[in-house]
Amino acid sequence: MGILNVIKLANDYSKAKKLLKSNKAKVEQIQKYIDSLHNFIEWIKDFKVELDEWIEKAKQLMRDLSTKLKEIKKEEK
């Protein structure tokens, strides 16, 4: 999902909050925003998984670099 879709979903979130306060809500509008919010939630869940994977990769890289640094320091002695 691209950044434009995320912006649209965030915009739909704001509109849905306003619609909730409105007395003029229509069934079609409500269903549209429910579907959009569902998509937004799924995207956030997927993005969280990606972030967790990136964090683990970065941690592993830091461990590898630390090991490399220790090896270099031992060789310098």
Image (cartoon, helix red, strand yellow):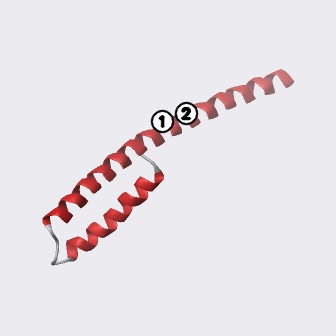
| Residue 53: mark in rendering | 1
| Residue 76: mark in rendering | none
The residue sitting at 21% across, 71% down in the picture is 20
Rendered image quadrant of residue 72: top right
Residue placed farthest to the left in the image?
A: 27
Closer-to-camera residue (63/44): 44
> What kind of residue is marked 1?
Glu
Circle 1 residues within 10 Å: few <14, some 14–19, many ≥20 = few
Q: Is residue 77 visible?
A: no
Q: Are marks 1 and 2 in contact (CB under 8 Å)?
A: yes
Count up the numbered dots: 2
Q: Position of residue 34 (x, y in %)?
A: 22, 57
Residue placed farthest to the top in the image?
A: 75
| Residue 57: mark in rendering | 2
The residue sitting at 79% across, 23% down in the picture is 74
Closer-to-camera residue (46/75): 46
Left/right placement of residue 33 relative to residue 66 reads left
In this view, 65 is above or below 10 = above
> What kind of residue is marked 2?
Lys
Q: Position of residue 42 (x, y in %)?
A: 32, 46
Left/right placement of residue 4 relative to residue 63 reads left
The residue sitting at 15% across, 78% down in the picture is 23
Closer-to-camera residue (28/17): 28
Circle 2 residues within 10 Å: few <14, some 14–19, many ≥20 = few
Residue placed farthest to the right in the image?
A: 76
Rendered image quadrant of residue 12: bottom left
